[in-house]
Image: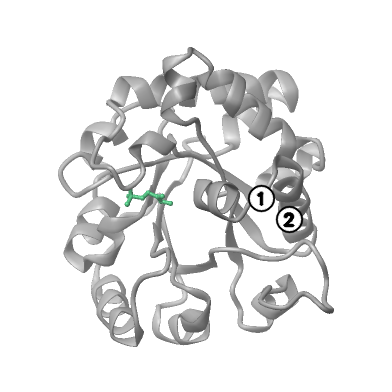
């Protein structure tokens, strides 16, 4: 069965109420191809507004969620709060969370399992830095990050997970991975899933690419067989560009 493409828009710490209005007006009015799922991830203060403005077929994701149920965790967002707002997606393990907020593979693994077990779907991010790639350690790093997630999950849990391969050197740099570079790692991730989880999970799991995706390069990337969509940063803040990316699968 062909995998449904997933196009995610990670707004990071950008945007305002007006952007929620602009992007929702554009996406709600567009006819999205069947076989394409769209999820937008505005900053936490706009999640409730976004959920009320975006049409029901467009998913809304948080950019973080705690692995704890509730309590004295100042500044954190709980999975129950997301569910209370009808938010059913979360991005976890983004390289900015790993690098700037010190989230370890284990922290991320615990967040992923807590979200999934409590009914929230996860876009789980992995990706190597330039120094890793140059040292030939791309798969070593990516597989270690995947293992941090897999260690906590049952094979059934993978039905609620999308893997985002985001090479750190391509994020926000304008240096997009070539379709061949991205395809190579996506294929390696799929093989890893086949041997470490199951062939069925490997076949069904969507592996999306992130890192300098824009309206011009998205269709060529989409033509690679193991690229099942994108996690878009900067270009997801521009309504027309994001819509073009949503339409990039022919
Ligand atoms: O980090 C990203 C998405 O999560 C990618 O960001 P850019 O598309 O701005 O490179």
Q: Which residue is mark 2?
A: 111
Task: State the residue at coordinates (46%, 87%).
Answer: 49
Q: Nearer the viewer, mark 1 or mark 2?
A: 1
Q: Position of residue 159 (x, y in %)?
A: 67, 46
Look at the picture and state if 148 lies above or below 115.
above
Mark 1 or mark 2: which comes first in sequence? 1
Q: Are marks 1 and 2 in contact (CB under 8 Å)?
A: yes
Classed neighbour count for the residue bearing mark 1: other residues with Cα under 10 Å, few (<14), some (14–19), many (≥20): some
Q: Position of residue 64 (x, y in %)?
A: 60, 63
Task: State the residue at coordinates (46%, 82%).
Answer: 46
Classed neighbour count for the residue bearing mark 2: other residues with Cα under 10 Å, few (<14), some (14–19), many (≥20): many
Look at the picture and state if 211 lies above or below 245.
above
Type of colouring: one colour
Q: Position of residue 54 (x, y in %)?
A: 40, 78
For residue 58, side relative to residue 151 (left or right) = left
Task: State the residue at coordinates (28%, 44%).
Answer: 213
Q: CA distance from mark 1 to mark 2?
A: 10 Å
The local secondary structure at tag 1 comes to: loop
Question: Which numbered circle lies on residue 64?
Answer: none
Q: Quadrant of residue 117?
A: bottom right
For residue 177, side relative to residue 129 (left or right) = left
Q: Can you tell me whether the CB of the residue at mark 2 lies under 8 Å from the nearest atom of ligand 1?
A: no
Look at the picture and state if 226 lies above or below 68.
above
Q: Quadrant of the C terminus?
A: top left
Is 150 or 75 nearer to us in this picture?
A: 75
Q: Quadrant of residue 130?
A: top left
Q: Position of residue 126 (x, y in %)?
A: 55, 38
For residue 235, side relative to residue 111 (left or right) = left
Question: Which numbered circle lies on residue 103?
Answer: 1
The local secondary structure at tag 2 comes to: helix
Task: State the residue at coordinates (35%, 86%).
Answer: 17
């Amino acid at each position: 069965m062909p995998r449904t493409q997933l196009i995610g828009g990670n707004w990071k710490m950008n945007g305002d109420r007006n952007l929620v209005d602009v992007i929702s007006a554009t996406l709600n009015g567009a006819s999205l191809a069947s076989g394409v799922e769209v999820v937008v991830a505005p900053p936490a203060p706009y999640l409730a507004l976004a959920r009320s403005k975006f049409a029901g077929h467009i998913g809304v994701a948080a950019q973080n969620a705690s692995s704890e149920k509730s309590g004295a965790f100042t500044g954190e967002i709980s999975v129950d709060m997301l569910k209370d707002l009808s938010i059913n997606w979360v991005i976890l393990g983004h390289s900015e969370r790993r690098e700037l907020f010190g989230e370890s593979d284990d922290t991320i693994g615990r967040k992923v399992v807590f979200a999934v077990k409590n009914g929230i779907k996860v876009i789980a991010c992995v990706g190597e830095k330039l120094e890793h790639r140059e040292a030939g350690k791309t798969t070593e790093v990516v597989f270690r990050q995947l293992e941090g997630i897999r260690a906590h999950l049952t094979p059934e849990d993978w039905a609620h997970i999308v893997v985002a391969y985001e090479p750190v050197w391509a994020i926000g740099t304008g240096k997009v991975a070539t379709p061949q570079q991205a395809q190579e790692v996506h294929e390696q991730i799929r093989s890893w899933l086949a041997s470490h989880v199951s062939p069925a999970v490997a076949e069904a799991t969507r592996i999306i690419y992130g890192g300098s995706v824009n309206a011009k390069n998205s269709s060529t990337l989409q033509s690679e067989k193991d690229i099942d969509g994108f996690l878009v940063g900067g270009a997801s803040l521009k309504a027309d560009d994001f819509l073009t990316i949503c339409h990039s699968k022919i």
